[in-house]
Amino acid sequence: MFDAQCDLAALVYTEGQDPDEILREFAWDLNANGYRAVGIVQLGRYCPDASLPATLVPTGEQLQLFQDRNAYSTGCRLDVGQLTGVGERIARILDEGADILIVNRFGRQEREGKGLAHLVAHALGADIPVVIAVPTHHFSDWITFAGGMTVKLHCDRESLDAWWRLVSARNASLRRSDRATVCEIFK
């Protein structure tokens, strides 16, 4: 069911874990080391003041994905229009070239086939690896969404880095063989 070299990885987290920090640092390190990480990462897990921001990768632009609510409202409500617009921007950035797509959550919108779900197919169709944070209690939904073709990663940087080393090395060797001349092949 799981392929350790699959280009689709779920960073599976429990209630007490913070996938956002792991994904932010991972994206930052990749971009600092010459890779092109593209996507979106939340800047926290909770929105008590209804202003949970996210960061667009690689630009670092901060985005508000939640609707402004009145002073008497509690919690937060996703602004689906804003999320759709962000998804379109990310798709355009992917089309300019990327080494990996990072998606902040497999949330309700994605479970329903909306939100940023289309970006996963878009990236994989362009042979761009994808990592997405998936809460433990929705992992079975993720398996259904991914058709079982996924890597299940622990919510830690070591697991994410190990997966990336395998996938990026394999993809680099495939790219090199795609450009090989006839002479290079027969050497």
Image (cartoon, rainbow, N blue to C red):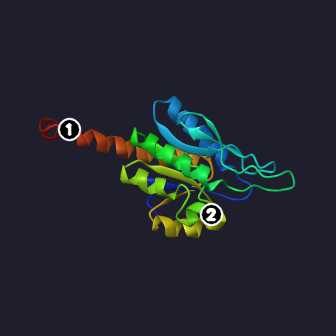
Q: Where is residue 95 in the image (x, y as percent from the top left)?
A: 40, 42
Residue depicted at 71% across the width and 53% down the height = 17
Location of residue 31 with respect to 40 vertically, above or below: above
> Image quarter for residue 98?
top left
**Are the two marked residues, 2 and 1, in contact with CB atoms closer than 8 angstroms?**
no
Q: Which mark is residue 165?
A: none
Image quarter where the C terminus lies is top left
Q: Which of 56 and 135 is in front in this view?
A: 56
Q: Which residue is at 51% across, 70% downward?
A: 144
- The amino acid pointed to by label 1 is Ala
User: 173 or 75, which lies in front?
Assistant: 75
Residue lying farthest to the right in this orientation: 72
Residue that appears at 41% across and 47% down: 128
Q: In this view, does 64 lie to the left or right of 143?
A: right
Q: How many labels does the image show?
A: 2
Q: Where is residue 167 in the image (x, y as percent from the top left)?
A: 42, 47
The answer to whether one can see residue 101 in this image is no
Task: Read off the residue under disc 1.
Answer: 180
User: In the rendered structure, which amino acid carries the disc numbered 2?
Assistant: Arg
